[in-house]
Image (cartoon, rainbow, N blue to C red):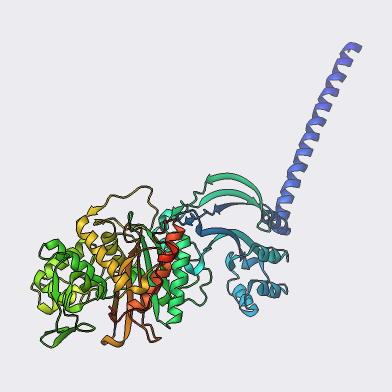
Amino acid sequence: MSDQGKTATWGQRLAAGLGAWRYGTVLGVFLMVVGALAWRLVDLHVVDNEFLRKQGDVRTIRVESIDAHRGVVTDRHGESLAVSTPVQTIWANPSEIDADEPRLTNVARLLGLQEAELRERLRKYAGREFIYLRRKIQPEIARQVLAMDIPGVYSRQEYRRYYPAGEVTAHVVGFTNIDENGQEGIELAYNQWLSGESGRKRVLKDNRGRVIKDLTLIRDAKPGRDLELSIDLRLQYLAYRELKAVVGAHNARGGTLVMLDVDTGEVLAMVNQESYNPNDRSQLSSDRLRNKAITDLFEPGSTMKPVSMAAALESGKFKATSTIDTAPGYRRFGRFTIRDHRNYGVISLTDVIAKSSNVGISKIATELGGDTIRDLYARLGLGQPTGIGFPGEAVGVLPAPPKWRPVEEATLSYGYGMSVNALQLAQAYMVLANGGIRYPLSLLKADEKPVGERVLSEDVSFQIREMLREVVENGTGKRAQPGLYSAGGKTGTVHLVGKNGYEDSQYKAIFAGMAPIDNPRIVTVVAVDAPQSGEYYGGEVAAPVFARVMGDALRLLNVKPELELGEAKAPRQASGERG
């Protein structure tokens, strides 16, 4: 073989050897890598699986809810009545916590928990991954708890409802439960409106439950819508202060005050006694929760006499100049006897109202008939819902017998044998005050004047207002005179009803009125339950509250005084006609 052929053969052998070596090397390295990976997998999953568990705990992808902000409730001027403030909730993963952890002693102290109960709960739910320790606490307390760095103890942001006016607006606004769902009042009635819609997002968390990174937004949170009430917080405070004072001064069982805008039907103030603090319900009792102005019924008594008189004038059978013989001061209907405070003899229709004559108004009722009076009562809104949309509203009772007995006609004319709530009574007086228009009542601020329904002539309503003026100036309501403003209204004193019927020594003192009487702006009803200080008539107990509230309210509303300082009539002692 030539040298050239030998060289070629050697080159081919060398190339083949190098190729085999490279192949073997690559194959060997590949097998080594595969072996190493296989060994690592076995090591991680069988021999040392703690590493993977820790790494999984360190970085986890979770779907987390985004809390929605509940809507704000304000008064008509934008003053906050209910707001949601951010707070922290402390929760735990019992499967990660040693129930004997010494630092849990300080956790229990900070959260106001019993240490033994806390440890017992952690043992009991050791198989779970979530339990609440304390919900909705101050962020500073949560920071102190988290600073202890206890494995398995975490926090999350939530919202807590806060009521700036406290007990002053409690019965109107109501409150929510711990999950911010309405339970009473406006919070309950408009829960769907105020409630937001929670969102959801995908996040990356570390082993301490802390969000490392927001990954994707699944659904954005929708905050609740705000609500503007018709309430004027200034008038609400004023009414609450005066009602609380009179209940305390007379050692009364409770009381109610309602104030309406005459020309819109808006509720400007609504307060009750006793009240409660919605920010601290630890001592809350169920009887304090009721908004008595809407839920509690009572016989309106003599406050219905002006409405009965309006029916008389509307019928055409009586005129403002007519007279009634009330002698001898009482009327008998079988075993029932109706009495006046004294024998007034022949008196005018105005004096029937001013002196609160039961005999006079009952004689008018006998001539009119029960259906005529009842018809006007119904047109003014009595015996039917006010449409205010408040939970727990009581409709009341407006009798409609197939045939009226004379005693039923008589008692209906001065407010017995029927029942109303304070808001209904205020609505009836609103119609008398504004010239005969019945507006729908509202706890929400009206953006424009509502459409009303005429239910009484303007002339008749004017004549009734003049009679109501006389009640305050010379009749049973002299203590209702609100300083520099003229006013009109009617007193009422009725027996409270107990388990066994009328309670002989327990009364409800009522005053319903309006001011200024020549151009009424506000109607107010005051009712005080079971005053115990000796005085119990409406003219003695409720009328002075009306005077103080109306005088200050009209000044706050910038209503021009009608009287000069020298002409101002201070509240006087009630006369012998008690009403």
The quarter of the picture where the N terminus appears is top right
| 198 relative to 484, above or below | above
Judge from the rendering whether residue 111 lies leftward or rightward of residue 383; answer left or right.
right
The one of 403 and 159 positioned closer to us in this rendering: 403
Residue at the (12%, 62%) spot, across then down: 315
Whether residue 183 is visible to the viewer of this picture, yes or no, is no
Whether residue 260 is visible to the viewer of this picture, yes or no, is yes
Q: Quadrant of residue 540?
A: bottom left
Q: Residue furthest right?
A: 3
Q: Quadrant of residue 275?
A: bottom left
The quarter of the picture where the C terminus appears is bottom left
The one of 133 and 376 positioned closer to us in this rendering: 376
Judge from the rendering whether residue 27 lies leftward or rightward of residue 412; answer left or right.
right
Judge from the rendering whether residue 195 lies leftward or rightward of residue 317; answer left or right.
right
Q: Quadrant of residue 364?
A: bottom left
The one of 445 and 150 positioned closer to us in this rendering: 445
Residue at the (48%, 68%) spot, across then down: 168
* Residue 323 drawn at (x, y percent): 14, 71
Residue at the (57%, 59%) spot, across then down: 85
* Residue 304 drawn at (x, y percent): 23, 71
The one of 566 and 336 positioned closer to us in this rendering: 566
* Residue 281 drawn at (x, y percent): 51, 73
Judge from the rendering whether residue 535 lies leftward or rightward of residue 25; answer left or right.
left
Counting the numbered discs, the total is 0
* Residue 61 drawn at (x, y percent): 61, 50
